[in-house]
Image: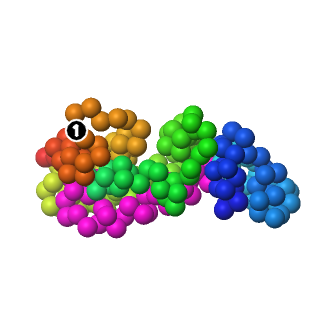
């Protein structure tokens, strides 16, 4: 996986090959195929790994907040502040290749399901505190949050300063979580 990630960063998603990965890892091409089956499976595994690493890294910031609006706000802020981090993202060499765009267009159902699962305890706590309406479908609400958070990575802000932490938090508190409120 490390070798595949390094090859993707060096060559890009379109140009790297299973041979490149095998060479980088110091194993045979057959060994790479044995573990991943095909190139698409390897790409999906690396993208899922990077995206999961990113989401897990945000958890400490999210947990510090006591309300759902604050938690989603911290997640949005984390996304805005860490999009270019080498440790948390996959630096792709081509201008037309972006990790977020690739994640959004790839068959990443399992990954989105994991992100939806990430929000389930926060939604349960928010319902117990009366922040969201009772009986709300927590899976759908989790998907709503994930979709909104992804927008912070790919869409420019028009009505607020996306580089101002307080503005991001206020935008989320005022608008994004409001649809879940009682």
- Residue at position x 86%, y 57% in the image: 30
Q: Position of residue 179 (x, y in %)?
A: 21, 41
Classed neighbour count for the residue bearing mark 1: other residues with Cα under 10 Å, few (<14), some (14–19), many (≥20): few
Q: Position of residue 38 (x, y in %)?
A: 75, 48
* 86, 47: nearer the viewer: 86
Residue 21 located left or right of residue 8: right
- Residue at position x 70%, y 60% in the image: 3
- Answer yes or no: is residue 134 visible: no
* Count of picture labels: 1
- Answer yes or no: is residue 63 visible: yes
Residue 133 located left or right of residue 30: left
* 160, 61: nearer the viewer: 160
Indicate the quadrant where residue 67 lies.
bottom left
Q: Position of residue 95 (x, y in %)?
A: 57, 36
Residue hosting label 1: 160
Please, what is the dominant secondary structure of the magenta stretch?
A: helix
* 113, 136: nearer the viewer: 113
Q: Is residue 83 above or below residue 155?
A: below
Q: Check residue 57 for magenta coloring.
A: yes
Q: Quadrant of the N terminus?
A: bottom right
Describe the element under mark 1 as helix, strand or loop.
loop
Q: Check residue 138 for magenta coloring.
A: no
Name of the residue lying farthest toward the top:
158
- Residue at position x 25%, y 41% in the image: 161
Magenta range is: 44-72
- Residue at position x 31%, y 64% in the image: 61
């Amino acid at each position: 996986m490390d070798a595949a990630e390094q090859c993707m960063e060096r060559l890009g998603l379109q140009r790297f090959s299973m041979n490149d990965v095998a060479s980088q890892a110091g194993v045979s091409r057959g060994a790479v195929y044995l573990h991943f089956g095909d190139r698409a499976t390897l790409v999906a595994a690396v993208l899922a790994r990077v995206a999961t690493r990113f989401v897990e890294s945000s958890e400490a910031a999210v947990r510090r907040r006591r309300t759902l609006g604050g938690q989603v706000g911290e997640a949005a802020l984390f996304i805005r502040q860490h999009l270019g981090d080498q440790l948390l993202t996959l630096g792709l060499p081509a201008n037309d290749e972006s990790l977020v765009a690739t994640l959004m267009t790839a068959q990443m159902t399992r990954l989105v399901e994991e992100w939806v699962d990430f929000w389930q305890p926060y939604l349960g706590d928010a319902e117990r505190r009366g922040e969201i309406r009772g009986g709300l479908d927590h899976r759908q609400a989790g998907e709503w949050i994930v979709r909104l958070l992804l927008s912070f990575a790919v869409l420019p802000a028009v009505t607020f300063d996306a580089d101002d932490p307080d503005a991001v938090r206020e935008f989320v508190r005022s608008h994004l979580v409001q649809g879940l409120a009682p």
